[in-house]
C-alpha cells in the first residue's frame, strides 16, 4: 500500500462506495451526513489514533492520548458545522499495557468529551499484537441543509483559515529533538483544540464550504478545490504562521503549509460576502485570515503573494502510506 499512496487508495475506496437513500454527504468529505427523516441531519465521523503514527507514548501522558484521539475526530464535526453529541471509543492495547495507562486514556476521553460538549457512550476493548490504537467514532447534529461541505466552493471564492498554522508541526519537531521549551507549540501538538464554535458560527450564516486542516493547508486546499471542481492559489505572505515559528525555523513555510495537525478550518466564501464575514466575525473566536482564492482549472499554485510570482511548494509527506 505504501507504493500506491494514501490519496490513490482513498480514491479507489470512494469509487467502490455507492451512495444510498438518506445519505446527504457521503465519502470524501470530513464527515458523513445522514438524514434518517425530514428535518434531521446526523453527522458521523471516525478517526483512528495509532501509536507510532499519530502519537508516541514517551512524549505524551496517557490521558493526553485519549484527549487527542477525540479532538481529532471532533474536528471533523467542527469542519461540517455540526454540534458534537455522542462519541464511542475502541481501545486496542498490547497485553503489556499498564492498567493505569488504560484508565488514564479513558479519563482523557471522558474529560475531553465534556470539554467538547458531547458524551462518551460506550465502545470496545480489544487486545492487539501490535501498537496501541484508540479508535473514536463521533456523532453530531446540524440544521438540515446547513452542513459545511468541501464540494460547495466556487471559482473566485476567497479562501480563509482560522487561527495559526505550523504550531503543531513545530511542536512535533521539538519533541523529536528531545526539547520541551516551547510550550505553546507543544500544546498545539499534544492538546489540539477543534474549532467547534467557529464551525457552528459559520454554518449558521451564509458560508457553505469548509474543511479541517488535519493534513496541512496544501493538501486540504487541494482536496477542497478538487471536490469543488476548481483549482486554487495560496499566498505565502498571507499565511498566519504560529508566533515564533517563522523566526525559529528556516523551513517555516513547509511547517505552515504541510505540517498538518493544526486542526484549523479552511473556509471558502464568495468574494462579495467577504467584507461582511470579516466584519461580523466574533472577536472571541480564533482569528480568520484570507490566504488565497479558488480559481479555474485544476491543481494548486503557491504564489509569493496576491498577484505575485509562482514559487514551488515545499514537499509534503503523508503519514499514511507514503
Image (spheres, grey):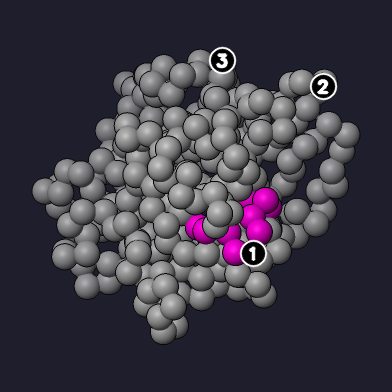
Query: Which quadrant: the N terminus?
Result: bottom right
Q: Characterize the local packing of mark 2: few (<14), some (14-19) or many (20 or more) Cα atoms within 10 angstroms.
A: few
- Residue at 38%, 21% (x, y): give it: 115
Percent x, y for residue 132?
45, 38
Q: Nearer the viewer, mark 3 or mark 1?
A: 1
Q: Is residue 18 left or right of residue 29?
A: right
Q: Are marks 1 and 2 in contact (CB under 8 Å)?
A: no
Picture quadrant of residue 240? bottom left
Could you tell me if the residues under marks 2 and 3 are in contact, i.e. CB atoms within 8 Å?
A: no
x 63%, y 50%: residue = 150
Magenta segment range?
150-159
Residue marked by disc 2: 38
Magenta region includes residue 178: no
If you read the primary sequence from the N terminus, does the residue marked by circle 1 or circle 2 appear first? 2
Q: What number of labels is visible?
A: 3
Q: Nearer the viewer, residue 8 or 184?
A: 184
Q: Viewer-nearest of labels 2 and 3? A: 2
Looking at the rendered structure, the secondary structure element under dot 1 is loop
Q: CA distance from mark 3 to mark 1?
A: 42 Å
Disc 1 crowd, CA 10 A, few/some/many (<14, 14-19, 20+): some
x and y percentages locating residue 271 in the rendered image: 55, 57
Q: Quadrant of residue 216?
A: bottom left
Above or below residue 269? Residue 39 is: above
Q: Which residue is mark 1?
A: 155
Marks 1, 2: nearer the viewer = 1
Residue, disc 3: 121
Secondary structure type for disc 2: loop
Q: Is residue 88 left or right of residue 110?
A: right
Amino acid at each position: 500500500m505504501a507504493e500506491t499512496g494514501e490519496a490513490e487508495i482513498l480514491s479507489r475506496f470512494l469509487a467502490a462506495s455507492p451512495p444510498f437513500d438518506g445519505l446527504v454527504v457521503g465519502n470524501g468529505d470530513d464527515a458523513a451526513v445522514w438524514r434518517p427523516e425530514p428535518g434531521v441531519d446526523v453527522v458521523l465521523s471516525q478517526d483512528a489514533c495509532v501509536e507510532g503514527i499519530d502519537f508516541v507514548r514517551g512524549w505524551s501522558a496517557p490521558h493526553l492520548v485519549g484527549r487527542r484521539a477525540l479532538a481529532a475526530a471532533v474536528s471533523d464535526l467542527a469542519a461540517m458545522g455540526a454540534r458534537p453529541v455522542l462519541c464511542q471509543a475502541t481501545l486496542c492495547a498490547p497485553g503489556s499495557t499498564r492498567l493505569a495507562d488504560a484508565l488514564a486514556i479513558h479519563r482523557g476521553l471522558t474529560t475531553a468529551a465534556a470539554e467538547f460538549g458531547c458524551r462518551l457512550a460506550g465502545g470496545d476493548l480489544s487486545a492487539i499484537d501490535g501498537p496501541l490504537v484508540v479508535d473514536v467514532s463521533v456523532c453530531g447534529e446540524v440544521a438540515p441543509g446547513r452542513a459545511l461541505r468541501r464540494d460547495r466552493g466556487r471559482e473566485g471564492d476567497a479562501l480563509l483559515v482560522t487561527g495559526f498554522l505550523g504550531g503543531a508541526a513545530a511542536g512535533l519537531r521539538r519533541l523529536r529533538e528531545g526539547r520541551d521549551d516551547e510550550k505553546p507549540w507543544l500544546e498545539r501538538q499534544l492538546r489540539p483544540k477543534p474549532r467547534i464554535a467557529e464551525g457552528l458560527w459559520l454554518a449558521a450564516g451564509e458560508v457553505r464550504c469548509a474543511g479541517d486542516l488535519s493534513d496541512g493547508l496544501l493538501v486540504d486546499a487541494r482536496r477542497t478545490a478538487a471536490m469543488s471542481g476548481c483549482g486554487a492559489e495560496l499566498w505565502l505572505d498571507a499565511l498566519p504562521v504560529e508566533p515564533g515559528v517563522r523566526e525559529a525555523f528556516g523551513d517555516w513555510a513547509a511547517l505552515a503549509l504541510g505540517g498538518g495537525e493544526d486542526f484549523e478550518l479552511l473556509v471558502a466564501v464568495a468574494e462579495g460576502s467577504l467584507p461582511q464575514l470579516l466584519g461580523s466575525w466574533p472577536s472571541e473566536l480564533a482569528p480568520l485570515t484570507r490566504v488565497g482564492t479558488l480559481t479555474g482549472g485544476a491543481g494548486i499554485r503557491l504564489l509569493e503573494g496576491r498577484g505575485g510570482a509562482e514559487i514551488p511548494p515545499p514537499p509534503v509527506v503523508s503519514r499514511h502510506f507514503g
